[in-house]
Image: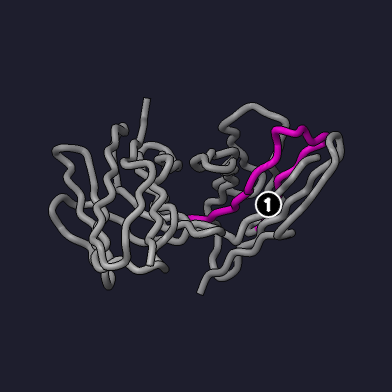
Amino acid sequence: EDKVVQSPLSLVVHEGDTVTLNCSYEVTNFRSLLWYKQEKKAPTFLFMLTSSGIEKKSGRLSSILDKKELFSILNITATQTGDSAVYLCAANAGNNRKLIWGLGTSLAVNP
Amino acid sequence: SQTIHQWPATLVQPVGSPLSLECTVEGTSNPNLYWYRQAAGRGLQLLFYSVGIGQISSEVPQNLSASRPQDRQFILSSKKLLLSDSGFYLCAWSGVSYNEQFFGPGTRLTVL
């Protein structure tokens, strides 16, 4: 059965800290790995990763995929209170039209 | 650019009442459309998806149904709501590559 597992489930840090969020996956015919940020509303798209070892970067956020070990990480440097959110990871299995979602990591950044 | 609309934003309904949530997409043609439900503190549960008008795939047998009467319109319905139908309902669309999905603002449904 296809599955995506995120860790940790919850994390509390202080402003300025660097955090690493983990996402491991087991899906048939893996196609891509996606990261989303969800505040108290709908998820917003962050990154899509399809190739191993190529870092995607947007400001203080970056992500990389390891297709051999079947995982991805999302890094946030110099965290700010506005980074507080649930970060969701999803895998696209190419043979169907669905995303397989993890449960998310809830990040709280304290001032 | 593409935009996705959902309404209403918040809904409080009594048990046993009907439900109709609507989602529309602008700025794209023939999108794949999805309905998700997210319970408090839980992940996204895919309810239905559609690859074209009148084509609906159901992921979880339950008290809900979906319809796609027009290319960019997706409707989630129920004839009689249950308490367990409470949650945050999200509509999403994706292009022909089936990769990234983009979400509407969501509807918070409370069934009392």
Tag 1: amino acid: Arg
Taking the spot 70% from the left edge, 40% from the top edge, the residue there is B86
Asked whether, in this view, residue B96 is left or right of residue B90, the answer is: left
**Residue A32: where, in percent of width, then height?**
30, 48
Taking the spot 59% from the left edge, 41% from the top edge, the residue there is B39
Asked whether, in this view, residue A109 is left or right of residue B10, the answer is: left
| In this view, B6 is above or below A93 | below
**Residue A74: where, in percent of width, then height?**
27, 54
Mark 1 — on which chain does it sit?
B
**Residue B48: where, in percent of width, then height?**
59, 40
Q: Check residue B81 for magenta coloring.
A: yes
Quarter placement of the C terminus of chain B:
top right
Give the residues in magenta: B73-94
Mark 1 Cα-neighbour bin, 10 Å: few <14, some 14–19, many ≥20: many
Q: Secondary structure at mark 1?
A: strand
Q: Check residue A52 for magenta coloring.
A: no
Q: Nearer the viewer, residue B107 or B68?
A: B107
Asked whether, in this view, residue A78 is left or right of residue B109, the answer is: left
Give the overall secondary structure of the magenta segment: strand
Q: Which residue is mark 1?
A: B108
Asked whether, in this view, residue B30 is left or right of residue A61, the answer is: right
**Residue A29: where, in percent of width, then height?**
29, 36
Which colour scheme appears in the figure?
one colour
Q: Nearer the viewer, residue B63 or B32?
A: B63
Taking the spot 18% from the left edge, 60% from the top edge, the residue there is A55
